[in-house]
Image (tube, rainbow, N blue to C red):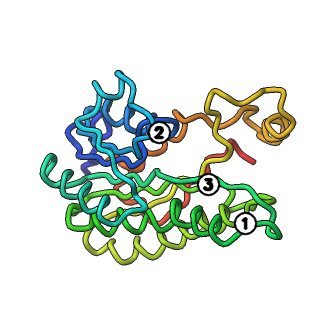
Amino acid sequence: MTVDTQPLDGGLKDKRVLVTGGTRGIGRAIALAFARGGAQVITCHLGSHEPDAELRHAVRDIHRADVSSGPDVARLAEAVAETLGGLDVLVNNVGADGAAPLARLEEDEWARVMDRNATACYRVTRAALPLLGEGSSVINIGSAAALRGRPAAAHYGAAKAALIGFTRALCKELGPQGVRVNTIAPGMVADGTEDPHDPVTQRIVALTPLGRLCRPEDVAAAALFLGSDSAAFLSGITLNLDGGI
């Protein structure tokens, strides 16, 4: 019996990757991780701040694009097609947090959080469909809040839960074309600005068997796996990345 083995880089070299919202936090970590693995990476940002020199040097291109805008998303897909010719990995990372008890949750805030987290994923994935061929991978960045719930954040939890349903439906719809679709659901992610003495941070760390917050690099490592050839038969899952809570 012959056992096929994957290359040590997981087959990432020269993979064509689009990471939305890839200039800071989780998105930046994912973009850099794929680039360091030898992939050709394009990312985008809203334009509120300039990408740092390390990221500019590592990735193939950085575009300004608002994923809440259909025309912007169409232009982004056209740019990816022109530069890369197709996609092997799509990472839907753009999202927006929100906090308000239901009694004070106005409809425009509900719509904003739903649009940035769920509808943006629909827009980008739909625009990228012609670029996704057999063996490609779609990775949606969700949240553990969709699985456990979070007080005063019904809109955020609902939006991230929508990604799980989106993932389950698309894995069946696109599977016959050889396209895999998965979601990563991180717990609270450290961004370097959190106060270790903050009661909420302390409570989450205390609840986490591994004794720390999730880091952007942890999410990037999960994305590398799901985007690699090592995950060639993995589709439709929600990868719970919360340190064991």
Q: Is residue 224 visible?
A: no
Which residue is more in the foreground, 167 or 199? 199
Nearest to viewer (mark 1 / mark 2): 1
The image position of residue 40, as x and y in percent, is: 23, 39
Q: CA distance from mark 1 to mark 2?
A: 26 Å
Residue tagged 3: 143
Height in image: 55 above or below 129? above
Question: Amino acid type of disc 1?
Answer: Ala
The answer to whether 121 is drawn above or below residue 227 in the figure is below
Secondary structure under the numbered disc 1 in the rendered image:
helix
Q: Which residue is under mark 2?
A: 220
Left or right placement of residue 116 versus residue 41 in this view:
right
Residue at 66%, 28% in the rendered image: 193
Q: Secondary structure at mark 3?
A: loop
Q: Residue at x 29, y 39 (%)?
A: 62
- Say which amino acid is labelled 3: Ser
Residue 173 percent location from the top left of the image: 36, 77
What residue is shown with label 1? 154
Quadrant assignment, res 153? bottom right
Residue at horizontal 28%, vertical 42%?
42
